Image (cartoon, grey):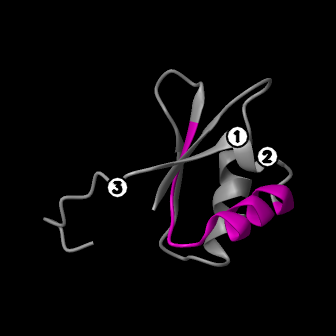
Amino acid sequence: MQSTIRITGSPPDVGAIEEAIRAADPAALVDIDPTGRMLRIATSIDAVQLLGAMRKAGYPVKEDQLERVPSECCGGCGG
């Protein structure tokens, strides 16, 4: 499942967020969109786990800040 979180204030530590999420989902991907305004996360963990990982990484967000978006995966790479 893919999620986005609007960045407010200073940019988050993407490495710390990715490390916290990968503790539960080793295949997770985290990045910031090219505009620098949106954190993008692809992971198999649910919203509760994701919010907990964000808190653990030092970037707490509220549930209403988390937007789940449909996957853009075509399945062509086998992932």
Q: Are marks 2 and 1 in contact (CB under 8 Å)?
A: yes
Q: Above or below — where is 28 with respect to 15?
A: below
Task: Report if residue 49 lies within the magenta region.
Answer: yes
As shown in the figure, which amino acid type bears the numbered disc 1? Gln
In the displayed structure, does residue 30 sit left or right of residue 52? left
Count every numbered label the image shows and give the total.
Answer: 3
Q: Above or below — where is 60 with respect to 73?
A: above
In the displayed structure, does residue 73 sit left or right of residue 23? left
- In magenta, the rendered stretch is 39-56
As shown in the figure, which amino acid type bears the numbered disc 2? Val
- Which image quadrant is residue 10 in? top right
Of the image marks 1 and 3, the number of the one nearer the N terminus: 1
Compute the Cα span from label 2 to label 1: 6 Å
Residue 44 in percent (x, y) is at: 50, 72
Q: Which mark is residue 6?
A: none
Residue at the disc numbered 2: 61
Secondary structure type for disc 2:
loop
Residue at the disc numbered 1: 65
Q: Name the residue: 84% across, 49% down.
A: 60
Q: Above or below — where is 27 with respect to 64?
A: below
Compute the Cα span from label 1 to label 3: 18 Å
Residue at the disc numbered 3: 71
Task: Report if residue 40 lies within the magenta region.
Answer: yes
Q: Name the residue: 47% across, 72% down.
A: 27
